[in-house]
Image (spheres, helix red, strand yellow):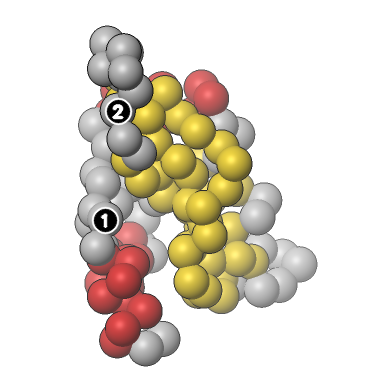
Amino acid sequence: MSAALASERKEFLMKLSSQAVQQTLAQFDAEALPETHPAVPQLIQLFGNHTYFVDGSGLLIVEPVQPTDAGSQQGVVVKLASWSDEGRTNLAPHAPEPTNVIIELKAA
């Protein structure tokens, strides 16, 4: 991975609270990687200090979006890597891909 791509990925850092992780998982079918997962140190080195999620499509994070007029905080799910094998054991990093999934993180 190029240094520029790694730097671009670290630009928007968002570590979610445990409550925000639970809110996210209630709205989005994925699994949160625990901080103790052996891959997390490498993920932090590559992408920055985020809360990481995996689903059937790959590795994801939640990035904040502008607060709504009502003052609630939302985030968009962004895919950072896709599974490169059928067994879902290897991830292939790529440029961040925002998805259409918007997460309600905090109500007004």
Relative height, residue 7 to residue 67 (above, below): below
Q: Residue furthest bottom?
A: 2
Dot 1 or dot 2: first in sequence order is 1
- Camera-side residue of 100 and 28: 100
> What amino acid is found at the position of numbered circle 2 in the picture?
Pro
Q: Position of residue 101 (x, y in %)?
A: 56, 37
Residue 104 located left or right of residue 81 = left
Q: Secondary structure at mark 1?
A: loop
Q: Position of residue 57 (x, y in %)?
A: 65, 55
Q: Secondary structure at mark 2?
A: loop
- Which quarter shows the C terminus? top left
Q: Is residue 21 visible?
A: no
Q: Position of residue 90 (x, y in %)?
A: 59, 72
Write the residue at 32% across / 18% down. Answer: 69
Q: Position of residue 35 (x, y in %)?
A: 28, 49
Q: Residue furthest front?
A: 69
Relative height, residue 16 to residue 80 (above, below): above
Write the residue at 24% across / 53% down. Answer: 13
Write the residue at 60% across / 34% down. Answer: 29
User: Residue 15, located in which quarter of the rendered image?
Assistant: top left
Which residue is the site of mark 1? Answer: 12
Report the mark closest to the observer, 1 or 2: 2
> What amino acid is found at the position of numbered circle 1 in the picture?
Phe
Which residue is the site of mark 2? Answer: 67
- Which quarter shows the N terminus? bottom left
Q: Is residue 8 visible?
A: yes
- Camera-side residue of 12 and 23: 12
Write the residue at 42% across / 49% down. Answer: 61
Dot 1 surroundings within 10 Å: few (below 14), some, or many (20 or more)?
Answer: some
Dot 2 surroundings within 10 Å: few (below 14), some, or many (20 or more)?
Answer: some
